Image (spheres, rainbow, N blue to C red):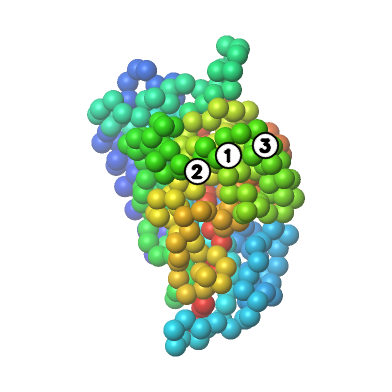
Amino acid sequence: MTALRKFLAAVLAALSLALATPAAAGGEPGKCTGSFVNPITDICWSCLFPISIGALDIWPSSRPDPDNPDLPLCLCGIRPGIAMGFWEPVRLADVSMKPWCFVNLGGTKLDPGFDIGFRSISGPSAIGGASQYYSSWHVHWYAYPLIYWMEIVADFLCLEPGSIDILYISEIDPLWQDSELTAIINPEAVLFANPLALAACAADCAASTANLPLDEMFWCAGCQGSMYPMNGNVSASIGHVQASRLVLSRFAYKLHRELVSWGTMGSAGLCGKYLMPVMRKQQYRFQMTNPNPATSGRNACPPIGASTTLQEPGQVIPAIGEDMGYLVWRKRNCCAL
């Protein structure tokens, strides 16, 4: 009952925010769509697995999993423990071409009261020429430590504590809409802005679709394209699922580069989070929550860069389902008591 009360309180808080702020008028492209995420039925609970102790999977899964520490025992300072590995749902993300569209809050469209974030009005079109492949997206990043606040596991120090909260809104970030300003945080992009570097991403595409992405090819987002620039401007937009997953991958990388997100996987993460300015793609899985939750099957929570061919059917509904929502799963290795 405690978990249910926390969830209802979060929903009421979001509704109060939406009702207290008038909807944006004229100029924005279309109606914001989406629905609240049901923490029971809209979650791919099999994405928690595999669960490991050392290198041994005590709860195996067919889903690809990065390497875990070999030894089952670990030591943090003078505290001994058991080296556990598991996947934890920690963040929600809205990915939409419509500014101030909060997809996972029921498709709420907010009016900030000032003209900001509306550069992303443009989107894929059928006008011909190169411009038809261009799209621009915004991202909203929520704290969503689902297992912790639902109290599914009690007194487990490895879980990220907290409650539902909005952590990041890209509309107010000047780096997110301007590729020249974005170069401040990714100056190395000039090294990979060539046909050879982009062609090499085919290997990452194959690896992430079959198993796990290649962390060594950090400039690649697999089948989706290039990680650079680290913003919402997509010059090669094939479809909503492909483009939104690419933007979400870039956003996660951007947070690591800005030292907002840290590493949690591998032997280095056993005793706590550590700096990871070059994001390891194997640390994340993205599960679709809007417009249609992906709750089962191998492609329910694929790794960064995996092909979207099998995910796109039924995920884009013209006019009523063009805004994307994702649940972010993060690999965690922890020295548990």
Residue visible at 44% across and 32% down? 179
- Quadrant in which the N terminus appears: bottom left
Q: Amino acid at mark 3?
A: Leu
Image coordinates of residue 25 in percent, x first then y, are 32, 20
Q: Amino acid at mark 2?
A: Glu
Q: Is residue 23 above or below residue 162?
A: above
Depth order, front residue of 73/199: 199
Q: How many marks?
A: 3
Residue visible at 56% across and 61% down? 331
Image coordinates of residue 291 in percent, x first then y, are 55, 36
Report the Cα–Cα distance between label 3 and label 1. Answer: 8 Å
Image coordinates of residue 193 in percent, x first then y, are 57, 35
Image coordinates of residue 287 in percent, x first then y, are 58, 48
Q: Residues within 10 Å of mark 2 (few under 14, many from 20)?
A: few
From the image, tell me which residue sits under label 1.
Answer: 192
Q: Is residue 302 above or below residue 155?
A: above
